[in-house]
Image (cartoon, helix red, strand yellow):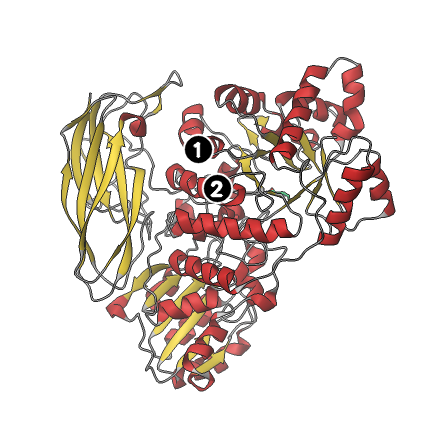
Amino acid sequence: MSQSTSMASLSESIKAEIRSGRWGSFLNAGSPADRAEAQRIALKESRLGIPLLFGRDVIHGYHTIFPIPLGQAASWDPELIEQAARTAAIEASTEGIRWAFAPMIDIARDPRWGRIAESPGEDPYIASVAGVAVVRGFQGASLANPSSVAASIKHFAGYGAAEAGRDYASTWIPEVLLRDVYLRPFQACVEAGAATVMTAFSALNGVPATGNPFLLRQILRSEWKYDGMVVSDYTAVKELVPHGYASDDADAARLAFRAGVDMEMVSTTYYDHLKSLIASGQVPLAEVDDAVRNILRLKYRLGLFDQPIPAPAHSAVTPESRALAQRLATESAVLLKNDGNLLPLAETVGSVAVIGPLADSPVDQMGTWVMDARPEDVRTPFAALRQMLGDARVLYAPGLKNSRDTDPSGFEAAVNVARRADVVLLFLGEEQILSGEARSRAFLDLPGAQAALAAEIAGAGKPVVAIIQAGRPLTFHQTASQVRAVLWSFHPGTMGGPAIADLLFGRAVPSGKLTVTFPRTVGQVPIYYAHLSTGRPASLSELGIPMGNPTNPTGYTSKYIDVDFTPVYPFGYGLSYTEFTYSNLRLSNSALTQDGALIVSADVSNGGQRAAAEVVQLYVHPVAASVVQPVRLLKGFRRVSLKPGETQTVRFTLRAADLSFHNQQMQLVAEPGRYQVWIAPDSVRGLESEFILR
Ligand code: NOJ
């Protein structure tokens, strides 16, 4: 049956249900032993011997926790992201899990939305690359390999555009935006072979995604020729009733099923009503056959029919998985500020003060969705710094109990510790429970009394480095202005501590770059780099209140009168401990034909004293188009490693297809005309040139 149900433990009644063939898959359920026994019963004792499928939220690791997906994307390192997903697949499959509810590839342009932590960020290109890397890592060379897990690309579609960043809220997405932004990562992952698709909770343009034939039948099945399996999100079929789309549960089952949802997750409207819906002719049997085929095909592809009954087994964090987690945490961290090159610190420093509620909090540094991780496996920054410098040189006072704490009674001890040290490492951010599903925030400040703690610490007169672990961009700019350096580490996972310690002391060089724009204030949201221009674009020379008179107006441009219109840290931004210079932008031709290729290249030099990696970005913009296009749109990137003094030529190949977008007739077209092109260190700077598409 097309039902995914949870199971706390394998009771006699569940065993009886499996024997009777009434159970097809389990969600987030049981122990390895329970799963092995349930599978044995399904294969050996049920009438048809159809294997069960065990799915789980393996989002950014299983036992070994990697940075949250928003952090992983900031590494711009698809190979490493793929290896992390492979590691998670091996750990999970060893314990009987063959289906992971990831990657989440919802484009997220609103940091109020708590699930931005699970997303690769705001851009369809990087989201496609990161999503495909996870699909490849999970599914390996063959799904039938027992260490492969089926990916579930989610949430189809538009969920990240929840109104006002409020989880589960409606989304209104014009079709061009849907196709050019929100659907692109899904299509890329479908092309990469993603085995399953999970529908979104949200309504898209008034039609809930879980009962949306336009999304599921027209786009997914008909246009993309998808032959994988579609599962609803958790109780999303039944939720068609409170949505106001279905009149009752039976109606919900009918609408979701007919829209193309093969399997219902957790709620039981299919189980309860499909039989009578078929009998009354409201659901055609042929569609039931299709859904069953989609589910069985997945089980065949996973090799579940052919593989021996698994023996219960356990996996664990290993030295290799730790090394990988540390590398990804290191590459994910983004250096946002480094006044006077305070960082890296010298390991000969006398003593450091470690302050803040996130310095030694294993659970919090793992971030959202870590159901299979153990806090005792986590290495915190405090532990890592003591290991690096010795206990005596690391003074510690958390100042606050957790990130929400508003009690200033710990401030005095923290200030005293700051005064005694040569440098202060201030660990701020959001604790685990503040980001992820249903964790929308209306304010993006540092929670609790952290800003006040930071101000007190800054007053102690020592150089301060803020290290921020969070699930979303925050507006922490007053604090940023009071400290010399800011290292943004997202929730970095199991090995976040050693990664941060290495970065602070120069054993590693920061190379992460943001895949989401950081606003100055929540009032600027949504703010993202790939916005459209207006007829009155803002300019830095015309800020503030519009002046002049009707015949000579100044400042009537698209901006705010009370805050700069620019973000505080743009998409693609991140500092290093070295200086990179970009020069010599060149194009292989001044024109590109519809079937030709254009090589765009530039020289990137490391002018500093340290070997370091730089994420070089390629952006384009058509000067005029039949549907106005973003002021810049990412079309490629390279992560290059450069020795001190080294110069490398970085090349990109552009084809007409890379420039395509949906026109007013919803045709994917590459329109002839002039295009601007940039090779850039981030989305606002870079070398610019132009070419013609013929
Ligand atoms: C709800 C979430 O939206 C989804 O992402 C997750 O996979 C399911 N719950 C299962 O836990």
Ligand 1 picture quarter: top right
| Residue 239 visible within the image | no
**Picture quarter containing residue 598?**
top left
- Up the image or down, 332 lies above or below 599; here it is below
Q: Residue 423's x, y, as percent?
A: 36, 78
The local crowd at label 2, few if under 14, some if 14 to 19, many if 20 or more residues have their Cα within 10 Å, is: many
- In the rendered structure, the answer to whether residue 240 lies left or right of residue 534 reads right
Between 129 and 435, the residue placed more toward the observer is 129
Between 649 and 583, the residue placed more toward the observer is 649
Disc on the earlier residue, 2 or 1? 2
| Residue 115 visible within the image | yes
Q: Which disc is residue 436 wearing?
A: none
Label 2: state its secondary structure.
Answer: helix
The residue indicated by pointer 2 is 136
The local crowd at label 1, few if under 14, some if 14 to 19, many if 20 or more residues have their Cα within 10 Å, is: some
Q: Residue 579's x, y, as percent?
A: 21, 60
